[in-house]
Image: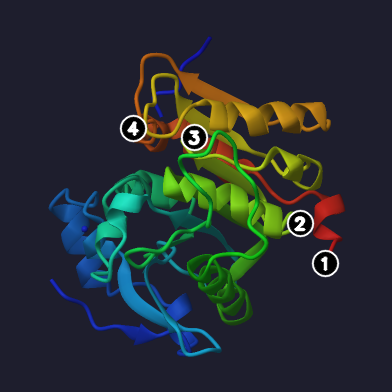
C-alpha cells in the first residue's frame, strides 16, 4: 500500500460587505509574510470576520482569499471544519491544524482559492452525534454551527467570485464528522470532500456516492475508532460509489498532519469538479 505523507487582534468585518470577499489582502501584509518565510503563519494571511445569520446568531470565521485575485475569474472554495479542541470564541484556534499548509506560497500560486475556516463555539458541534457510540446516525437537523457555516457559504456564492462547481469541504475529528454530515445534507453541492478521522452514517451512502471522497484515518486511533470511517466507506462502495480510503497503520488520532502536508492531497482536491449530473441538480 502506498501511504500518503500528506494562528494580534483583527477587526471583525461584517459579511454583508460584498467587496471584502473578493479583494486580496493588503499587499504589504502578504509580502512581509512571504519575504520573512513565515507564510505558514495563518493568522498573517487569514482575515478575521463575523457572520450574522437571519436569526441574529453569529459565527466567527477566518478567510484566506485567492492570491493574485482577478475580478474576471472564479475561484474554488475550501471549507475547513476544525476539531473539538479548537472550539471557542477567539477566532484563532481553528487555524491551529492544517491551515498553514494552505498558506504555502507555491500552493497558493498553483491553486488560488478561498479557504474558509469557521469556529465552532464551546460546547457545540459541527454534527450533533454521539462520539462514544459504536456507529453514526445522521441527526434530524444540522447543528446550529453547521447551519450558519452553510448560510455563510451561500452568501459567498452570491457575493464573491466563487466557482460553484469547485466547492470543497474537509475537516478533522469533530470536523470529520461535520464533513460527512454536510455531505449528507447537501449531496449535490460539493465537488469533493476530505473527511479525516471522523465518521458518517452508512445509511446516507446512496445519496452521496457520486461525490469524490478521499477519507483518512489512523489505524491506531483510540479517540475516534477507524471503524467509523471504514463503515461509511464500505457502505459507499456497496452503493456503487468509488471513495478513496487511506488508513495509516500505527498512527493514532493525528492523521491530519501528514494528510494536509502532502502535495498529493492538495493536487487531488483541486482537480475535482462537480460532474454534469451533480451540477444539474438543484
Q: Residue furthest top?
A: 1
Q: Are marks 2 and 4 in contact (CB under 8 Å)?
A: no
Q: Position of residue 195 (x, y in %)?
A: 53, 41
Q: Measure the alpha-carbon separation of dots 2 and 4.
A: 30 Å
In front of the other: 99 or 237: 237
Number of residue marks: 4
Q: Nearer the viewer, mark 4 or mark 1?
A: 4
Q: Earlier in the sequence, mark 3 or mark 4?
A: 4
Residue drawn at the location 53% of the way across and 23% of the way down: 246
Residue at label 1?
282
Residue at label 3?
265
Q: Measure the alpha-carbon separation of dots 2 and 3.
A: 22 Å
On the rendered image, what quadrant is the C terminus found in?
bottom right
Q: Earlier in the sequence, mark 2 or mark 4?
A: 2
Residue 188 marker: 2
Residue drawn at the location 66% of the way across and 42% of the way down: 201
Amino acid at each position: 500500500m502506498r501511504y500518503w505523507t500528506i494562528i494580534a487582534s483583527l477587526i471583525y468585518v461584517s459579511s454583508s460587505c460584498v467587496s471584502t470577499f473578493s479583494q486580496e489582502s493588503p499587499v504589504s501584509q502578504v509580502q512581509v509574510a512571504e519575504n520573512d518565510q513565515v507564510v505558514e503563519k495563518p493568522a498573517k494571511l487569514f482575515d478575521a470576520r463575523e457572520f450574522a445569520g437571519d436569526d441574529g446568531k453569529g459565527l466567527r470565521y477566518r478567510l484566506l482569499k485567492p492570491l493574485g485575485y482577478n475580478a474576471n475569474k472564479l475561484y474554488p472554495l475550501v471549507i475547513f471544519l476544525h476539531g473539538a479542541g479548537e472550539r471557542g470564541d477567539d477566532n484563532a484556534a481553528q487555524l491551529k491544524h492544517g491551515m498553514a499548509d494552505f498558506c504555502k506560497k507555491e500552493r497558493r500560486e498553483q491553486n488560488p482559492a478561498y479557504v474558509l475556516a469557521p469556529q465552532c463555539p464551546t460546547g457545540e458541534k459541527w454534527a450533533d452525534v454521539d462520539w462514544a457510540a459504536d456507529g453514526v446516525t445522521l441527526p434530524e437537523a444540522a447543528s446550529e454551527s453547521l447551519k450558519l457555516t452553510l448560510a455563510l457559504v451561500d452568501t459567498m456564492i452570491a457575493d464573491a467570485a466563487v466557482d460553484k462547481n469547485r466547492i470543497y469541504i474537509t475537516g478533522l475529528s469533530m470536523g470529520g464528522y461535520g464533513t460527512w454530515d454536510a455531505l449528507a445534507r447537501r449531496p449535490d453541492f460539493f465537488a469533493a470532500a476530505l473527511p479525516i478521522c471522523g465518521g458518517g452514517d452508512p445509511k446516507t451512502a446512496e445519496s452521496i456516492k457520486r461525490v469524490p471522497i478521499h477519507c483518512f484515518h489512523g489505524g491506531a486511533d483510540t479517540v475516534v475508532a477507524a471503524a467509523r470511517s471504514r463503515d461509511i466507506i464500505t457502505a459507499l462502495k456497496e452503493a456503487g460509489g468509488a471513495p478513496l480510503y487511506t488508513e495509516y497503520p500505527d498512527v493514532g488520532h493525528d492523521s491530519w498532519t501528514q494528510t494536509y502536508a502532502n502535495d498529493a492531497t492538495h493536487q487531488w482536491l483541486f482537480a475535482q469538479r462537480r460532474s454534469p449530473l451533480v451540477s444539474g441538480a438543484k
